[in-house]
Image (tube, rainbow, N blue to C red):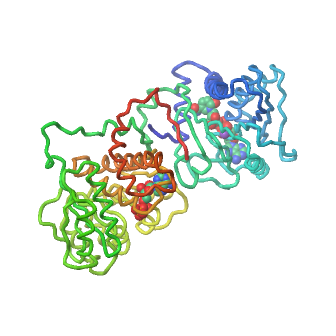
Amino acid sequence: MKIFTARQIYEADKSTIQKEQIKSHELMERAATQLFEWMHSRLRGTQVNIKLFCGIGNNGGDGLVLARKLNEHGYSIKVYVVNYSDKRSEDFLLNLERLKDGKVWPDFINAESDLPEISPNDIVVDAIFGIGLNRAPDAWVGNLIKHINSSRAFTLSVDVPSGLPVDRGPWEPSYVVNSSYVLSFQVPKLVFFLPETGVYVNQWEILDIGLDQDYMINTETDFELIGRPEVLPMYRPRLKFSHKGTYGHSVIVGGSYGKIGAVQLASNACLSIGSGLVTAFIPKCGYDSLQTAVPEVMVLTGSREKNISGIEIPFEPSVVGIGVGIGQDDDTVSAFGNFLKRVDSPMVIDADGLNILSQNPEMLKDVPALSILTPHPRELERLMGQWSSDFEKLEKAKAFAAHYNLVLVIKGAHTITIYNGKGYVNTTGNPGMATAGSGDVLTGMITGLVAQGYSSVEAAIFGVYLHGLAGDLGVSSKGYEALKASNIVEHIGNAFSDVFRQPEMEQKESGQN
Ligand SMILES: NC(=O)C1=CN([C@@H]2O[C@H](COP(=O)(O)OP(=O)(O)OC[C@H]3O[C@@H](n4cnc5c(N)ncnc54)[C@H](O)[C@@H]3O)[C@@H](O)[C@H]2O)[C@@H](O)CC1
Ligand SMILES: Nc1ncnc2c1ncn2[C@@H]1O[C@H](COP(=O)(O)OP(=O)(O)O)[C@@H](O)[C@H]1O
Ligand SMILES: [K+]
């Protein structure tokens, strides 16, 4: 699913109005009807106090239409107009009159007003700012937002949490509504998925308001949300007359004394995702344990006992995944540098492999084109320097990936794969996966997909998706705290099956942060 910028959403809006020959207030009515139906189908007339905070633009207009409909259906509502500017939008004004026609009289809040009482049992509708926010809210509006946040009432945000700009980080983090639930029009917004701004969104759902499909289909976006519909077409079915050679021979290079488990996890994951053959290249000390732990994996050892000082692979691997548990011994660093010079097919580089590149940036030019680098945020910072916001991080990552012609997998709660100027935002995974070794599993999975003939970018996107899904399935039996990286490996097969499961009903895009 494409992720549009605010500018593109306004264009889609305009295009819809032109094509359908409708007025903008009719589109607002359509959007707010969706909001109403969402609430009504859940509340079914429950007599709870609903407090609607409406700005003076179109987001506020949506809130006023919703208020009118709730009132018509007998809900107990109170409307507050947050009067932050004189420039009221036409559709806001039209709907203010319509609301008054229904005998609902909003309270107008300005800088001098007392803060209205909000009980934890109320439902707050947050329609103060939408995607039109273009500067920091004034201090008094910010204080109102803080007041809403401290009320502990269930807070339903219209389109976006108020105070959260959609194309940059917030000016003042405490002036952003902490939404319990965001009902976002037509398309998800990138900020829902970034670590700095995703924290304002507990759960989100898309409401289809029928924006112009031609525009949506034909407009290129810089980011895409990756769910089941996006990965299904990537799947390469296994062929009846295939054999293990059909699915590639992966080599996992890594490990050092005390960190052989990383290679065990990666090579086990590599097998479980379907690589025909897997060989691990490790220092001598890991031989017995690895052979015992994963008998299906072949093991090659270097000449040293505790770390790798030279990498010799006596056959042509389909792909190499390198770096997990490898350490940064001087001899390992030079072995890694020499190896890079000798290999020219794409590889997967993780963990200390990335740290070695950061310490020795001259090696970057030897990384084969289309290699996949899988840094967590600290490793990414070492690779490309600091950033001041998530948006800057993404721009820097795009430039870095383009400069070296690489695929960059930025790991996190919503892992983002960067390639060729685009970002692919993953939707699977959970905080149970914040556990030792889960990154090693991902390295093995992506390596195993490349071995089977997936392109680098597909292997990264599909591997990240399956990894998160395996983690989600693991959590359903283990719980968040007890989930271990090896449980993720155990669920790789179930993750494949889940991709092909027929959804019980037509899937709506929604998510939980
Ligand atoms: N494009 C769509 O798909 C649709 C959008 N609609 C709604 O329209 C919203 C966008 O409405 P608007 O463009 O009117 O913008 P907003 O309602 O988000 O903001 C209102 C106006 O306030 C001003 N403003 C921005 N930051 C401010 C600040 N810090 N202090 C004071 N004033 C500030 C701006 O001039 C802005 O246009 C969407 O979020 C959505 O809720 C719906 O009505 C219908 C369809
Ligand atoms: N809160 C979270 N939500 C979803 N996925 C997560 C979360 N925390 C970590 N992960 C995933 O777990 C993996 C952790 O990788 P990494 O930090 O390299 O671990 P390690 O070095 O221990 O193997 C990444 O794929 C990341 O996306
Ligand atoms: K809002």
Q: Residue at x 37, y 59 (%)?
A: 374
Question: In which of the image's four quarters is ligand 2 placed?
Answer: bottom left
- Horizontal and vertical percent position of residue 241: 12, 38
Q: Nearer the viewer, residue 411 or 63?
A: 411
**Quarter assignment of residue 222:** top left
Q: Residue at x 56, y 18 (%)?
A: 21
- Horizontal and vertical percent position of residue 285: 26, 75
Residue 394 is at least partly visible in this image: no
Q: Residue at x 77, y 53 (%)?
A: 139
Direction from residue 216 to residue 456 in the image, left or right: left
Residue 501 is at least partly visible in this image: yes
Direction from residue 290 to residue 416 in the image, left or right: right
Direction from residue 206 to residue 342 in the image, left or right: left
Total marks shown come to 0
- Horizontal and vertical percent position of residue 307: 28, 77
Q: Nearer the viewer, residue 492 or 62?
A: 492
Q: Is residue 287 above or below residue 179?
A: below
- Horizontal and vertical percent position of residue 214: 44, 27
Residue lying furthest front: 292
Q: Is residue 100 above or below residue 256?
A: above
Q: Is residue 345 above or below residue 457?
A: below
Q: Quadrant of the N terminus?
A: top left
Q: Nearer the viewer, residue 412 or 481?
A: 481
**Quarter assignment of residue 256:** bottom left
